[in-house]
Amino acid sequence: MYTIGIKKTEMALYMNSKKSYQEYISELGKKIKNYRIMKELSQQDLSDKTGVSIRSISRLEQGESVQVDNLFKVLLALDLGDNIDLLVPDQTKRPSYYLYSSDSGPQRVRKKSVKTTFKWGDES
């Protein structure tokens, strides 16, 4: 059983998507492992930094079940905290939100044309 907040009824929904939830978890684990290696941290170093056991870090990197708080501790330790907001986007920040809440005023300035009275060519 995965402890990342997915209920069994919701799993069926994810299973019909292009990727299964297991594929997403496995892909996430691979990415976390790559970030850890790029930061030149061993699993022991990451464990010391986060307080998460080496076994949990290993399971996470292998795409196995981990607790959500351990996942977030690892992401924060790898300086990926800014990306956590991307997991579930804020609905108030949709493009349509910016359309209707824009108080910036006009974005173009048009030259004022001088109105003249129309005259025929033979009039002076």
Image: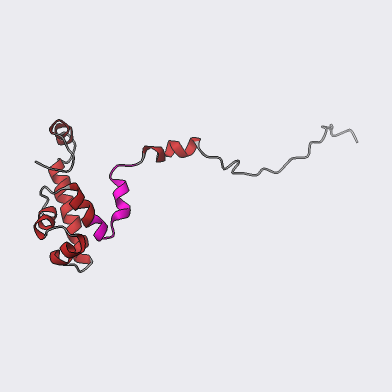
Q: Left or right? Give the position of 97 relative to 32.
A: right
Colour pattern of the rendering:
secondary structure
Q: Could you say which quadrant of the image residue 34 lies in? A: bottom left
Tell me: 114 left or right of 105: right
Asked if residue 91 lies in the magenta stretch, the reply is: no
| Residue drawn at 40 percent across, 41 percent down | 93
List x then y, in percent, for residue 117.
Answer: 83, 33
**Residue 76 forms part of the magenta stretch:** yes
Residue 17 place in picture, x, y as percent: 19, 36
Q: Main secondary structure of the magenta part?
A: helix
Which quadrant of the view contains residue 123?
Answer: top right
Does residue 62 sit above or below 2 in this rendering?
Answer: below
Location of the C terminus by quadrant is: top right
Q: Which residues are magenta?
A: 75-89
Residue at the image position 19 percent from the left and 67 percent from the top: 41
**70 lies above or below 15:** below
Position of 24 compared to 116: left or right? left
What residue lies at 37% left-to-right and 37% top-to-bottom? 91
Residue extending farthest front = 51
Which residue is at the front of the view, 92 or 47? 47
Query: Of residues 12 and 66, which is closer to you in this image?
Result: 66
Q: Position of residue 88 (x, y in %)?
A: 29, 42
